[in-house]
Amino acid sequence: MEQIERIKAMELYLDRASQAVIQLSAALDDYAVVQKALSELSAYYSSNEWKEDYAADEQNRLPKSLKRGVLSEDAIWNLLSDSRELNSRLLEMGTELASH
């Protein structure tokens, strides 16, 4: 019976790891695609254009129907911070994996 249980356990590992590899590969593909967008957001957030857009929003000069999450003081900052943290995790994991 020990052999059967071992095979069942290994089968679960195989299924879980296979799914995780597929999902991570797809997520990394998506993340690679948005790198240019992250760079553009970073440049915009530190530009005079963002400050002008923010001021226009504060002065109610923008249409109320306009989606303007990029003008919140936290949305872009949080996204860029999360992206930097993710990049650090990826580098750390890559280093760990390379040493195995």
Image (tube, rainbow, N blue to C red):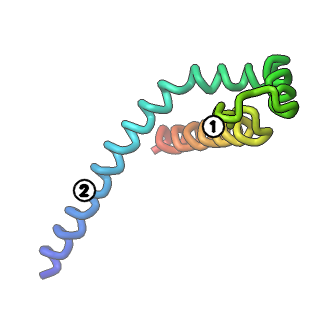
Name which residue type carries label 1.
Ser
- Residue 2: image quadrant is bottom left
Mark 1, other Cα within 10 Å: few <14 / some 14–19 / many ≥20: some
Label 1: which secondary element: helix
The residue at 30%/57% (across/down) is 16
What residue is shown with label 2?
A: 14
What percent of the width, then of the height, locates residue 86?
Answer: 60, 41
The residue at 80%/31% (across/down) is 57
Quadrant for the N terminus in the image: bottom left
The residue at 70%/40% (across/down) is 75
Name which residue type carries label 2.
Leu
Tell me the CA gap for discs 1 and 2: 30 Å
Label 2: which secondary element: helix
Q: Earlier in the sequence, mark 1 or mark 2?
A: 2
- Residue 74: image quadrant is top right
Q: Is residue 78 above or below residue 51?
A: below
Quadrant for the C terminus in the image: top left
What percent of the width, then of the height, locates residue 3?
Answer: 14, 74
Mark 2, other Cα within 10 Å: few <14 / some 14–19 / many ≥20: few
Q: Is residue 58 left or right of residue 68?
A: right
What residue is shown with label 1?
A: 83
Q: Is residue 49 visible?
A: yes
